[in-house]
Amino acid sequence: MAMQAAVFRRAFEPVTIESVDVDAPRSREVLVRTVATGVCHSDLHLVDGDMKWPTSDPIVLGHEGAGIVEAVGADVTSVGPGDHVVACLSG
């Protein structure tokens, strides 16, 4: 499945909106159609070159989101397709 994402490639360069492929959820994963997301200060640290994380691969920004569950893996029991959810994927 293809989706649009804010992609960071290098510090001090513009973030680009790109089409990326997303796999179907694995056993304990949830696929969420993102309706809204924040780009928080930790994302800005990356863009401004203040983070010491390795950045050789592209990174999709926006780890604080809200949306609707599209699909769940076989072992997911707490949410299901159609549920509205919020997430913070840091940590």
Image (cartoon, grey):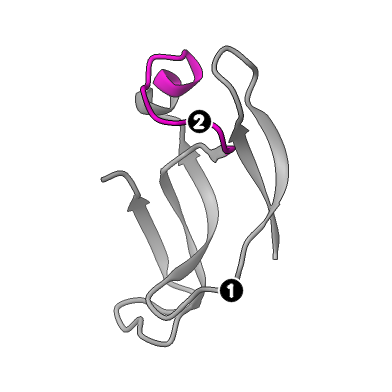
The Cα atoms of the two marked residues, 2 and 1, are separated by: 25 Å
Which mark's residue is nearer the viewer, 2 or 1? 2
Residues at circles 2 and 1 in contact by the CB criterion of under 8 Å? no
Earlier residue among tags 2 and 1? 1
Residue displayed at 42% across by 43% down: 63
Left or right? Give the position of 5 relative to 62: right
Q: Is residue 18 above or below residue 14?
A: below
Residue displayed at 31% across by 44% down: 90
The residue under label 1 is: 24
Q: Which image quarter is the C terminus in?
A: top left
Question: Residue 30 in magenta?
Answer: no
Residue 27 image-quadrant placement? bottom left
Q: Amino acid at mark 2?
A: Thr
Q: Is residue 75 above or below residue 39?
A: below
Residue lying farthest bottom?
Answer: 74
Q: Position of residue 58 (x, y in %)?
A: 59, 37
Tag 1's secondary structure? loop
Q: Position of residue 25 (x, y in %)?
A: 51, 73
Left or right? Give the position of 63 relative to 32: left
The residue under label 2 is: 55
Q: Is residue 49 above or below residue 34?
A: above
Tag 2's secondary structure? loop
Residue 50 image-quadrant placement? top left
Task: Tell me which secondary structure the magenta stretch mostly adopts.
Answer: loop
Residue displayed at 43% across by 27% down: 43
First to last magenta residue range: 44-58
Instruction: Name the foreground residue: 89 vs 69.
Output: 89
Total numbered labels: 2
